[in-house]
Amino acid sequence: MKKTKIFADANLNVGAIDRHIFGSFIEHLGRAVYEGIYEPGHPAADENGFRKDVIGLIKELNVPIVRYPGGNFLSGYDWRDGIGPKEKRPVRLDLAWFSTETNEFGTDEFMKWCRIAGIEPMMAVNMGTGTILDAARLVEYCNHPGGTTISEMRRANGADQPYNVEYWCIGNEMDGPWQIGHLTAEEYGRKALEAAKVMRWANGEMDGAAGPNGKLKLIVSGSSNHEMPTFPEWDRTVLEHTYKQIDLLSMHRYYMYSASRKRPLEDFLGSADDMSEYIGTLQATIEYVRAKERSQKRVGISFDEWNIWTVNAPRHEPLWKRAPHLLEDVYTFQDALVFAGLMNTLLNHCDAVKTACLAQLVNVIAPIMTEKGGRTFRQTSFYPFRAIANNASGKTVRAISDSDTFENMFGQARYINEAVTHDKAKREVCVSLCNYAQEARAAELELRSFGDLRAAEYIEMTSSDLFAVNSFDRPDAVVPQEKELPSVKDGSRVSLTLPAMSWSFLKFRY
Ligand code: AHR
């Protein structure tokens, strides 16, 4: 059996893990909001119409922050449509997804849902058809205590105290011709700078000084993926316009399995290492602009849409339906394997990636699926997310491995893909390991300078059927199995056998 050695030393840290990297995303798209998180009349709905069964599953995932309301939807959305008495709210055509938007759920409902679910909101302002004043007024609506027409509207709508939203996305995928009101990098860069400026002013921030509730964390739209013809020039240009005003550059990326590729499996399994390179390029772009700006400030990355997305439903079918079944990918075991690798990548880049949103959270390319009026199930991808988001904390430790590699459409990728984290306060070390080889592999872990380690948890996900899925009728077809705890030699050395095509997660304590 081939052996891979993985070495990690407590003194070699990548950086602190910001828990915001375990965020997610709810867009007005398909059944994410309606029949997803919000379904009045469902047996599990509370008095607000929020599905408690869904909130329970989201709590299991330990998601700290949720981005809202879009996505492509954002660029045609007027936030005023979603506030005030529900019976007076307009019904609109949603031109992003060719659906009907009833606006029964809007900003105030989202804020209430966040409070009940124990989640921090990440709001987004429309830069496609919206103005910079619309953006500033949404900040005013959410964060200004009272005494102005806009803030009094919020109070009249039931929220006496401001929401004090800290994280704000300035637009969504503005580099994409599919975006309503798509702009060039120059146009968007200029507009985003002005939007950022007035959004800060609406928050009471002046000349770099904090407002009464602190400072907004502002995110500019970076590239929608690294296959965009404008990548990475888009990012450079936008950063050059906005660097002084913003905190984070967004990036998006979805990976897919395609049977029509030359090496379908290898090309898919190469996703995690490709994501790593993509982050590296944007990190370098940020550093370039920082140097040019002679700035001390380090702009971080908000990876605010990432996932596996294979089913590309035509967005016009069914035309103008309310809550249509759109983008309802059912994730395979193989998807979960790649997904775990993507999470490893996020952890391994925690020095740069400060927020990330799994896109999306419910029904739409999501770890949680719901039936109208009925059941839920956890997708295969639910499990790596749950284990990692609940356990990987503190710092990521740089892991050095001698894994061999395989060729794929992105270049070379490692058969053994790992992330090691260390929480000094909790005295815990976690290791997430993917084996992308078609045969079992031996892994020799050498976890040095942490203390006298003993194994505390060990789970493994594997399946003889790469395309096995969970469903409403077979919700537990693909789940991780608990394994016998391995012994730790000299408090630091662990020998494991990783089955062919598997993901393993271990927790050690000292
Ligand atoms: O998450 C689904 C869609 O993917 C979002 O609306 C858009 O931002 C991205 O293209």
Image (cartoon, helix red, strand yellow):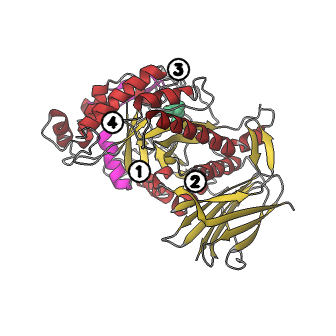
Helix or strand or loop: what does disc 4 sit on?
A: loop
Where residue 357 sits: x, y (%)? 50, 45
Where residue 150 sits: x, y (%)? 19, 34
* Of labels 3 and 4, the one closer to you: 3
Closer to the N terminus: mark 3 or mark 1?
1
Q: Local crowd at mark 4 within 10 Å, few (<14), some, or many (≥20)?
A: many
Q: Is residue 297 above or below residue 173?
A: below
Q: Is mark 2 within 8 Å of ligand 1?
A: no
Are discs 3 and 1 less than 8 Å apart at CB? Answer: no
Spatial distance from mark 3 to mark 1, Cα to Cα?
Answer: 35 Å
Q: Local crowd at mark 2 within 10 Å, few (<14), some, or many (≥20)?
A: many
* Of labels 2 and 3, the one closer to you: 2
Spatial distance from mark 4 to mark 2, Cα to Cα?
Answer: 37 Å
Where residue 86 sits: x, y (%)? 27, 35
Closer to the N terminus: mark 2 or mark 3?
3
Can residue 30 be seen at all in this image of the molecule? no
Q: Local crowd at mark 1 within 10 Å, few (<14), some, or many (≥20)?
A: many
For residue 384, the mark is none
Residue 151 horizontal side relative to residue 231, left or right: left
Spatial distance from mark 2 to mark 3, Cα to Cα?
Answer: 31 Å
Q: Which residue is mark 3?
A: 177
**Quadrant (top left/top right/bottom left/bottom right) for the C terminus:** bottom right
Q: Please state the extent of the stretch shown in magenta in the rendering.
A: 89-118
Residue at the image point whose x is 52% and y is 22% from the top? 178
